[in-house]
Amino acid sequence: MRVALHTRLRPGKEEEYERAHREVPPDLVAAIKAAGAREWTIWRDGLDLFHVIDCDSYERLLASLADLPVNIAWQARMAELLEVTHDYSAAGAAIRQTYGRNLATRTGEFAVRSHEAFDRIRLGEDITRGQQVERFVVEAWTGTSWRQIAAGTTIGYSRILALAAPVTADRVRVRIEQSRGAPHLAFFGLYRT
């Protein structure tokens, strides 16, 4: 199973975070592998951290690590650096709470259920047809015109966009501005954290 997480650094903690991850304790690396993680990759974009964890069971992984002294020490160190931390106590509940209910419905454009506010957008391309999108914009209908709420470059298999503030709209659309070939969106979702 693969699990994607998003955490966020406190402003000004970027260098300290990078330094800490150059010095991850070998005991922690061994504990993470012993708990069932085949791979744990983190990408940083400014203050945002995107994690992908390849493991047998995310819940078992968290349960195995939760009480280990080496992990407790590491999490305490990370808590000093992170604004949004990885929550071991919920064992994935926050992910299911946020991404368990898609607020978008499929019609010509994407309609939003009952004008609900959302602050996350998830897009995915049909990778069997190749990764085609090179630049895109997501727009929300204001009642009189379309307003840009997010933009990005590639989408790939799955891309999650975190909005600065919740948006309420009854329609949302994705406009592809540049692509290598014919783009094929396989997934579109709106969520609220």
Image (spheres, rainbow, N blue to C red):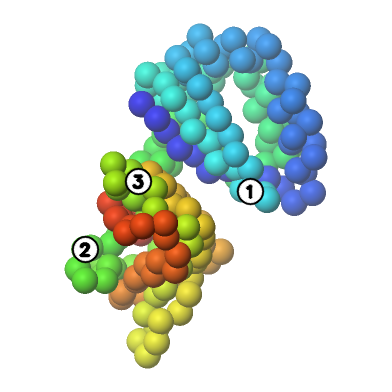
Q: Name the mark nearer the viewer: 2 or 3.
A: 3
What residue did someone put label 3 on? 130
The dot on residue 34 is none
Residue 154 seen in the figure:
yes
Q: Is residue 44 left or right of residue 110?
A: right
Residue 8 seen in the figure:
no
In the image, what residue type sits under mark 3?
Gly
Give the residue drawn at x 39%, y 37%.
93
- Between discs 1 and 2, the one toward the N terminus: 1
Badge 2 density bin: few <14, some 14–19, many ≥20, Cα 10 Å: few
What residue did someone put label 1 on? 45
In the image, what residue type sits under mark 1?
Asp
Report x, y in % for residue 58.
41, 25
Q: In which quadrant of the rendered view does residue 21 lie?
A: top right
The alpha-carbon separation of the residues under discs 2 and 3 comes to 23 Å
Report x, y in % for residue 114.
26, 70
- Between discs 2 and 3, the one toward the N terminus: 2
Give the residue drawn at x 65%, y 28%.
75
Give the residue drawn at x 40%, y 30%.
2
What residue did someone put label 2 on? 106
Give the residue drawn at x 50%, y 65%.
151
Q: Name the mark nearer the viewer: 1 or 3.
A: 3
Badge 1 density bin: few <14, some 14–19, many ≥20, Cα 10 Å: few
For mark 1, give the secondary structure: strand
